[in-house]
Amino acid sequence: MHRYFAGLAEATFQSQLGVVDPPMIDYLSDLLIRFVRNDAVHSVRSTNGRPLLSVAEMVSEAAERLGDAKRKIHQHIGDFTLFWAGVYPEALRRPNDPVDTTSDQFENYCTHGRRAYRIASCIDLSSNDGPEPVVLERLSEQFDLCCYGLREVRRQWEDGDDNHLGSGTILVK
């Protein structure tokens, strides 16, 4: 599965969008792999162990944390919002208005995601456990492009068309 998502992400971002940034593309393909598991999507917990399900809850919890814990929660907020806004933007539509395709919730996710990655990029880790700050900074700066690219990755996997990956890519399904 890792090679499949890595191949889709690389082909989409490099060939289709002209983004040649291997560390960022690797981060995005790893994000897709991590979020295949539902427990990874909701991995942030409050201090009493309750899973935090909304962006607002995660932002509040991040404000209470320091150091590595604060950085990890902000990184997760960025990941969470990028995943939903990029891969499943239709899930962010207003539930009572299926005709409305321009949801405030979508824009809120994008705003929180950009901000969270920026904050995470400014917090030094006491360990080497996590992505380089420069990768998180680029995710913040290019959040909208990453959303678009992840939508294209989803379109490719739904189409089931492996021809776009090029002849040098080997997939294991």
Image: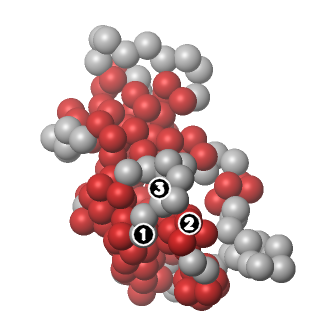
Instruction: Tell me: 125 left or right of 20.
Output: right
Reading the image, the residue beneath label 2 is 68
Cα distance between the residues tagged 1 and 3 = 27 Å
- In the rendering, at what x and y percent does residue 92 appear? 51, 74
Residue that appears at 60% across and 46% down:
34
Instruction: Tell me: 117 left or right of 83.
Output: left
- In the rendering, at what x and y percent does residue 113 appear? 42, 72
Label 3 or label 2, whichever lies nearer to me, is 2
- Residue 139 at least partly seen: no
Give whichever of discs 1 and 3 has the lower sequence position: 3
- Identity, as a three-letter code, of the amino acid under mark 1: Ile
- Identity, as a three-letter code, of the amino acid under mark 2: Asp
Q: Secondary structure at mark 1?
A: loop
Residue that appears at 50% across and 77% down:
93
Residue that appears at 24% across and 41% down:
21
Q: Secondary structure at mark 3?
A: helix
**Could you tell me if the residues under marks 3 and 2 are in contact, i.e. CB atoms within 8 Å?**
no
Cα distance between the residues tagged 1 and 2 = 8 Å
Instruction: Tell me: 169 left or right of 158.
Output: left
Q: Secondary structure at mark 2?
A: helix
99 or 112, nearer to the observer: 112
Question: Among all residues in the image, which is located at the extreme front?
Answer: 126
- Identity, as a three-letter code, of the amino acid under mark 3: Val
**Could you tell me if the residues under marks 1 and 2 are in contact, i.e. CB atoms within 8 Å?**
yes
Q: Is 50 rendered above or below residue 85?
A: below
Q: Is 66 rendered above or below residue 134?
A: below
Q: Which mark is residue 123?
A: 1
Reading the image, the residue beneath label 3 is 87
Colour scheme in the image? secondary structure
